[in-house]
Structure formats: structure tokens, C-alpha cells
Image (tube, rainbow, N blue to C red):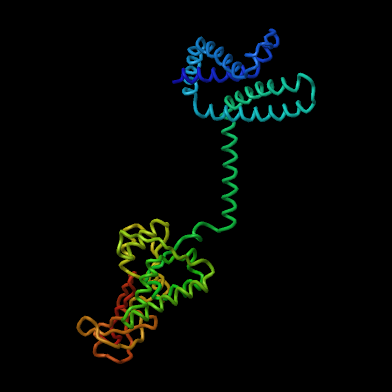
Amino acid sequence: MLKWTIQIAFVLIGGTLGFLFLPHLYKLINLSDNPWIHNTYVSVIIGAILLYIVALFLTDYLIDFIKWMEERLLKAPIGDLLFGTLGLVVGLIVAFLLGTAVSSMAIPGVESVVPVLLSIVLGYLGFQVGFKKRDELIQVFISSKQSTSKKKSAEEEEQGQGLSLGTYKLLDTSVIIDGRIADISQTGFMEGVLVVPQFVLTELQHIADSSDTLKRTRGRRGLDVLKTLQTERASAVLIVEEDFEDIQEVDLKLVRLAKKMSGIVVTNDFNLNKVCDLHQVRVLNINDLANAVKPVVIPGEIMHVVVIKDGKEQNQGVAYLDDGTMIVVEGGKSYMGQAINVEVTSVLQTSAGRMIFAKPQDSK
């Protein structure tokens, strides 16, 4: 295939050379009077035949040369070839610019010869410089890239005081319905971007459209909370359309999305809290925050409470603090509906909430 390609190339070159130069040769050897000579096709055919004959002798040598060049190029490192080619291109561009300047001088003989010489010399020098100075050129590019990266990092530090400010915090349905997230956000303690996945918003809408009055009220409250967050929050509240069709449970979808976005789940659902822990997803539990800011109660402390209902165990009574914390009063059933002083015996505090155990102060 390569042999035929070379021979066809010689035939085409020969036809072109015959068309361009044979008429002048006829004049030199006094053959211009022959009528066949004035036929253009005859010149083309003669030139093609002559170069084809030459190709018969040179084709094998050319094939060997091409294979030798191919072998050398394949063995050469790609980096050497790349930088050598870049150097060649730069050299040819410089030669073109200088050749254009020389041609504009209109010096006989120089304007046609000098551009060719410049292309050969500068092209060769460019290739050699790019080939042999590869390591130095790579070092220049690396130093420039590192300088740009350092500059970009400095700009990012100036624009934002740390990456934590841009952390995604994904809200689940329970924390939206709870409503305290709006108050916390308003105080400025909830940094970063609040994310509401579309599947959470859909679940919230289903709750708001429920036939059950209580559920419908809670769902509409959740939608109002989201509206409040969007209007009053300084940073964005992002609605994410991404869904996971292979998962049915909204909580598991939320965990998957948190992993994908490297975000934090914000919830007050104790079970979701445990699921996130199992999947090694960070969680912000509103109940944990509420417990952290509640007044500290220690065993032996005296509290004044009103027993309002029976406890689960025999003779237990139940009272509540103003913040909703439940107090289990041992032997408090007999004080139903009364305001009494109780002494704290122990405190149980978990992510699900805080429970205080106490006994009437006058009990023995």
C-alpha cells in the first residue's frame, strides 16, 4: 500500500512539473514548432511517465527511509516529540515574520531565497531547543501553575473565612415541621447553605394535603417555615431536584444525598440520627442543641412543679417544665393536680430529649 502511494505521488508530481516546466524546455531545445508540443496534456503525460520511471528506482529506498523514521519516532518519548514540535512551530512563525520583513525590501534574488533559508534554519533550531530544553520548559509551566494556585487560594481565603461557611445542611421533614430551625437560623447560628431536597418537599406537601386535620396543620406549618427561611435568611435556601428512584424511604434518600453532597443532615428525628451515624454521615440534632442550652439540673436540687397526670409505673406522677421537659415524680400520683416541691434524684439526657426523675421533698 505504501509503495503504491509513493508511486502515485511521483506520478502526480511529475504531471505537475511537466505542465510547468516542459514548455520552457521545448523552447531551449528548439522543439516549439512541433504541433504536439503545444498540447498541455502531452506535457503532463510526459512529466508523469518520467517521474514514474524515477519512482521505480527510488521507491524501495524511500520505503526504507520512511520505516526508519517511523521506528525512531515511535521510540522517542512523547514529551520530546511534543516540545520539539512546539519549538518547530515557534521557529517557523519567527521565520515567517522575518521573511515577510525581508520580502518587503524588494531586493532582487534575496526576497525569494532568504525566506526559505530562514524557514529551514529557524525551524530546525526551534525543534532542537524544544527537544533539548523540555525539562526546563516543564519546570517553567509547573512554577507558573503553582503560582496561580497559590494566588487563587489566597483569594478564596479572603472571600470566605473558611470552607465551613459553605457547608450544605440538608433539612429533613421533621425538623421543618418542628419550626425551631427558623428561630435558630434567624439568630445566625446556622451557617452555610440550607438544602431542601425535592423529595422532602413532596412529602411535606402530601402531609399538608392530608385528610387528617392534625397532619394537615403540621404540613402547612412546615411550608410556612420554609417560606420564612427563604425570606428572612441571609444566605441561600437551596431546593435540590435530585432524586433516587431505587430508594423508597425518604430518610434513606436524604442520607444518600448527604453523602453525595458531603453535607450535614439537620433533624430532630432520633431514628434518623441513628441511621446517619451508621452511614457515617454528620448530623445536627435540634434536640441536642435544645438540651445543650437548657438550664443544668443536678441531683439534690429542689424544684417547684405541678403534677398533672399519672406515670407509666405504679404511684408515679408526671410534671413538665416550661420548656416541655418531662419530670417523673416517684410516689407523685397522690399529688395529682397539686403544686409541690420535688427533689431531683437523676437526669436522663439523650438525643430524643431530656427526662428528670424526682421525688416529693417531704417524702421519707
Single out the residue that lies furthest toward the front.
35
Above-or-below relation of 232 to 118: below
Residue at horizontal 53%, vertical 20%? 9
The foreground one among 192 and 109 is: 109
The foreground one among 166 and 300 is: 166
Residue at horizontal 47%, vertical 23%? 74
The foreground one among 158 and 112 is: 112
Above-or-below relation of 79 to 288: above
Q: Position of residue 345 (x, y in %)?
A: 30, 77
The foreground one among 115 and 90 is: 115
Quadrant hosting residue 209: bottom left
Image side of residue 249 versus residue 105, left or right: left
Which image quarter is the C terminus in?
bottom left
Q: Position of residue 48 (x, y in %)?
A: 56, 16
Q: Position of residue 244 (x, y in %)?
A: 35, 60
Image side of residue 230 versus residue 47, left or right: left
Single out the residue that lies furthest toward the bottom.
338
Image side of residue 280 versus residue 116, left or right: left
